[in-house]
């Protein structure tokens, strides 16, 4: 079996050119109907969809048009991709004319009538359906019955699973992944396929005499290119059986399947901003009642705010302890219980210490079992004095104290910064702190129901509020909290912005930019505000920032906070009904996990597909191709093919035998030696702990030179590993198997890790998966020096150190962090080390212990190694 070398455009072109006539016609028809659906003057779906309550004698044409109509390009593309190989096989077995008569006749009408009966008579609904997926499942049903006749059971452990249930499983999976798909429409197609495969619908096929008469009178074979006659269909079916017994599919299909997974995954991502794939936001928790109460903050509270701001101005040059002393006096005077907490963190040779101040307003109608948190850091993430935010929080606390409606305690937390202080406070509140670094809290309340952080350093009036919601490690708050704040802000006449999109026009471009910015923040996993530290503890939290110049003053922002706190005060339990996994496109549009998850899963699946393929191929030896016998006249020899115990099929002529001989190989099963490749893969992942430890414990001023040294070693490491860890005593055949198993185990682990990660941090899994896609197509056979150099350069260009350097450069240029490449790299690595030590950031773990080991193994596989020729056996081993 030859090695997988990647993709061949020549093979792909040859496959397309060999497609029979009816299959080509369906592809053209589906494409033409999709293009026609783009015309604004014609509602194609309304005209040709299968709509149960509009079926009558004058609309019977819908029975044949609905499979050709699709919702969008993506829908049509996927159905064409799935339908083409199945329809090609069916047409090769039954001929072009029979396929035409069946699929524009009984094999489309029967499942259509089944669906109409279920939808109208049983369910009493009127859900319309379009798309060729009903043909796909019909053909899958036929194939399942054919497989069941020769291989009745799939054995998994001690369980025997009938092979005929595979289409039913696919129906359920498709419904789960694509909720808008028609479950009963697909079931109708599978049921019809079962009936046809079992032979109960043979009577609907046109008689053989009629077919021969039509083909003879019209001379279709001569007039129509790629037409398959009745007589040719027997020979074509035999050729199909030959292909099933041949291993060409195993050699050529996996790279194309993997590429299809990658392309479809990327296309899926870029379709998400469209209306067909995203949804409008809504409030799931009725108890929130956002904007249903009148906010009274204002009036004389404006004078209180100005007084507190004057106090803050007097403290802006004071130390942390002096500030807390003054604020403690203010809060104690309001009548609150006040506590203080010291902490000290160490990261990259730097020490971060400070003292948190917090106060608890006990609820008049509560029992101290629940609390809401208002966080106002002394300095925000940009190290700006949170002057107006602090004054507003003190005014709000004094205002809240006068009300008797609170059923939950209100905790005001004032940390010295937005990065370390609030993390220490949250950890200590949940008793998850390190006593050597963080002091315990002297005062506590009940379970935290939600948190709102204020970031208001700017002067003057504002137009909108910017909602920051990204948490540590890509975790997100419950979507109901964001929707509530948007609703309350709208009630106050204030706009809402997300992901620093100040002029969002709700266009596709703006939706895509908002989504991608959110994915970048989620993928990096860093803290984006004082709220981020709450989310890992399942406390829904956001940061509110006034932005732009407008006519709203501080009292308007105070009313937004008041409305938010009163909504959270209504809760009887934690927010749980809405989404925790989503991508926001705008303040009122989002995509849920069920819609966006397939994108990352498809990218991760391409690694698993290639890993399984390489495992299967590593169990066979490859020898020289046997010479094909000379062609003989048709009819000289009758070939007898037996397909897994089924009845013999007689084929006139030697065409089938010639096809087998032309592609035959003297392959035989061989024993796999898995110890060495498995040990190397496991060792490479353990080796990832070295850069993880080094970059998280190196002083910040040494990070840049250490990174440069590591990058140089990283470029040489695959060469050294290939030379030292690949035994030179192995034969060429053993070398091939060694590289296949090495790549198989590495890709299997990578696919498994990314699939699991996608459910926790979709953006990080997708980003790593896309950057690692060249590893799927790393050649496992010896290539020429130029090819090896080219592929090694490609792998080095997409290596983790290279991506880190490029990312740091981009951040330094557009975000103003660091100075140039070196400064940017040092700053980025220092931030990653800080996140690892303080926030519990796991992005460095994924980079150095998942992605980097897979890259290292890919480099070893690409470089290969020497091996001695094998002279024992039937032939000389072939090295591509």
Image (cartoon, grey):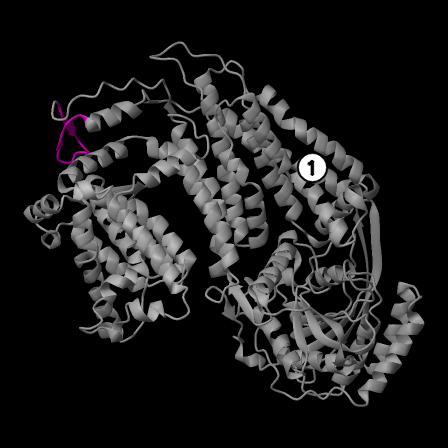
Could you tell me if residue 449 is visible in this image? yes
**Quarter holding residue 323:** bottom right
Q: Residue at x 19, y 61 (%)?
A: 110
Label 1 SS: helix
Residue named by callout 1: 691
> Where on the picture, by quarter, is residue 295?
bottom right
Where residue 274 appears, as percent x and y from the top left, is 50, 64
At x 59% / y 35%, what residue is drawn?
Answer: 855
Q: Is residue 285 above or below residue 758?
A: below
In the rendered image, residue 442, in percent from the top left (x then y), is placed at 78, 67
Give the class, few, some or many, for how many residues have Cα within 10 Å of label 1's Cα (few <14, many ≥20). Answer: some
Image quadrant for the C terminus?
Answer: top left
Residues shaded magenta: 637-654
- The image shows residue 593 at horizontal and vertical percentages of 50, 60
Q: Does the magenta segment cover residue 325?
A: no
Residue 201 is left or right of residue 227, and the answer is left
Q: Residue at x 71, y 39 (%)?
A: 693
The answer to whether residue 368 is seen in the rendering is no
């Amino acid at each position: 079996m030859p090695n997988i070398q990647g993709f061949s455009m020549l093979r792909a072109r040859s496959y397309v050119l060999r497609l029979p006539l009816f299959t080509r016609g369906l592809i053209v028809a589906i494409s033409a109907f999709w293009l026609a659906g783009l015309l604004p003057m014609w509602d194609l779906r309304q005209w040709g969809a299968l709509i149960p309550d509009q079926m009558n004698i004058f609309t019977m044409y819908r029975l044949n048009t609905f499979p050709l109509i699709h919702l969008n390009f993506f829908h049509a593309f996927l159905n064409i991709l799935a339908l083409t190989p199945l329809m090609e096989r069916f047409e090769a077995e039954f001929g072009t004319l029979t396929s035409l008569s069946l699929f524009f006749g009984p094999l489309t009408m029967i499942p259509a009538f089944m669906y109409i009966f279920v939808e109208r008579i049983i369910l009493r609904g009127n859900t319309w359906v379009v798309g060729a997926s009903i043909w796909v499942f019909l053909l899958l049903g036929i194939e399942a019955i054919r497989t069941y006749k020769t291989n009745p059971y799939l054995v998994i452990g001690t369980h025997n699973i009938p092979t005929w249930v595979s289409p039913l499983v696919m129906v359920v999976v498709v419904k789960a992944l694509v909720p808008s798909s028609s479950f009963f429409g697909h079931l109708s197609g599978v049921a019809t396929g079962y009936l046809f495969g079992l032979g109960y619908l043979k009577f609907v096929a046109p008689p053989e005499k009629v077919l021969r008469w039509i083909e003879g009178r019209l001379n279709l074979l001569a007039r129509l290119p790629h037409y398959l006659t009745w007589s040719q269909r027997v020979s074509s079916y035999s050729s199909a059986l030959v292909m099933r017994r041949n291993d060409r599919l195993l050699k050529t299909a996996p790279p194309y399947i993997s590429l299809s997974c990658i392309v479809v995954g990327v296309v899926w991502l870029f379709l998400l901003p469209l209306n067909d794939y995203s949804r409008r936001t809504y409030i799931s928790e009725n108890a929130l009642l956002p904007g249903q109460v009148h906010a009274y903050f204002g009036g004389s509270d404006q004078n209180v705010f100005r007084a507190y701001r004057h106090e803050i101005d007097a403290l802006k040059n004071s130390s942390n302890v002096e500030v807390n002393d003054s604020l403690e006096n203010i809060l104690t005077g309001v009548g609150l219980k006040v506590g203080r907490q010291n902490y000290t963190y160490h990261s990259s040779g730097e020490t971060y210490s400070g003292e948190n101040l917090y106060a608890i307003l006990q609820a008049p109608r509560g029992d101290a079992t629940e609390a809401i948190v208002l966080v106002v850091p002394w300095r925000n993430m940009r190290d700006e004095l949170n002057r107006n935010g602090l004054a507003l929080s003190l005014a709000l606390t004094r205002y809240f104290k006068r009300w008797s409606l609170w059923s939950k305690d209100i905790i005001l937390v004032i940390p010295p910064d937005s990065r370390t202080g609030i993390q220490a406070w949250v950890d200590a509140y949940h008793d998850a702190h390190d006593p050597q670094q963080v002091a315990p809290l002297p005062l506590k309340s009940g379970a935290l129901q939600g948190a709102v952080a204020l970031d208001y350093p700017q002067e003057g009036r504002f137009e909108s509020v910017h909602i920051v919601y990204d948490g540590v490690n890509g975790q997100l708050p419950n979507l109901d909290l964001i929707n509530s704040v948007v609703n309350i802000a709208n009630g106050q006449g204030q706009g809402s912005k997300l992901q620093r999109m100040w002029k969002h026009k709700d266009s596709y471009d703006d939706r895509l930019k908002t989504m991608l910015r959110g994915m970048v923040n989620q993928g990096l996993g860093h803290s984006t505000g004082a709220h981020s530290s709450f989310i890992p503890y399942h406390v829904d939290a956001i940061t509110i920032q006034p932005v732009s110049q407008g006519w709203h003053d501080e009292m308007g922002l105070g009313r937004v906070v008041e409305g938010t706190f009163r909504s959270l005060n209504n809760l009887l339990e934690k927010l749980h009904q809405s989404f925790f996994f989503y991508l926001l496109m705008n303040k009122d549009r989002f995509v849920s996990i069920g819609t966006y998850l397939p994108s990352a899963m498809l990218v991760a699946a391409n690694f698993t597909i290639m890993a399984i393929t390489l495992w299967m191929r590593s169990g066979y030896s490859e020898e020289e191709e046997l010479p094909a016998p000379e062609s003989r006249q048709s009819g000289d020899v009758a070939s007898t093919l037996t397909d897994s115990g089924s009845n013999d099929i007689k084929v006139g002529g030697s065409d089938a035998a010639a096809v087998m001989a032309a592609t035959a190989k003297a392959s035989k099963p061989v024993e796999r030696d898995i110890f060495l490749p498995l040990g190397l893969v496991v060792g490479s992942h353990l080796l990832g702990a070295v850069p993880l430890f080094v970059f998280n414990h190196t002083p910040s001023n040494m990070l840049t030179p250490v990174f440069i040294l590591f990058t140089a070693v990283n470029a040489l490491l695959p060469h050294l590993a290939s030379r030292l860890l690949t035994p030179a005593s192995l034969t060429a055949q053993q070398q091939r198997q060694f590289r296949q198993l090495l790549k198989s185990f590495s890709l299997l682990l990578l696919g498994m890790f990314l699939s699991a990660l996608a459910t926790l941090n979709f953006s990080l899994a997708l980003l790593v998966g896309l950057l690692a896609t060249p590893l799927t197509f790393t050649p496992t056979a010896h290539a020429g020096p130029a090819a090896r150099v080219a592929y090694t350069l490609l792998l080095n260009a997409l290596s983790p150190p290279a991506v880190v350097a490029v990312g740091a450069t981009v951040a330094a240029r557009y975000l103003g962090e660091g100075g140039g490449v070196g400064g940017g790299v040092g700053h980025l690595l220092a931030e990653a080390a800080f996140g690892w030590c303080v926030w519990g950031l796991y992005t460095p773990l994924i980079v150095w212990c998942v992605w980097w080991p897979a890259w290292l193994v890919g480099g070893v596989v690409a470089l290969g190694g020497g091996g001695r020729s094998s002279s024992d056996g039937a032939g000389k081993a072939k090295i591509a």
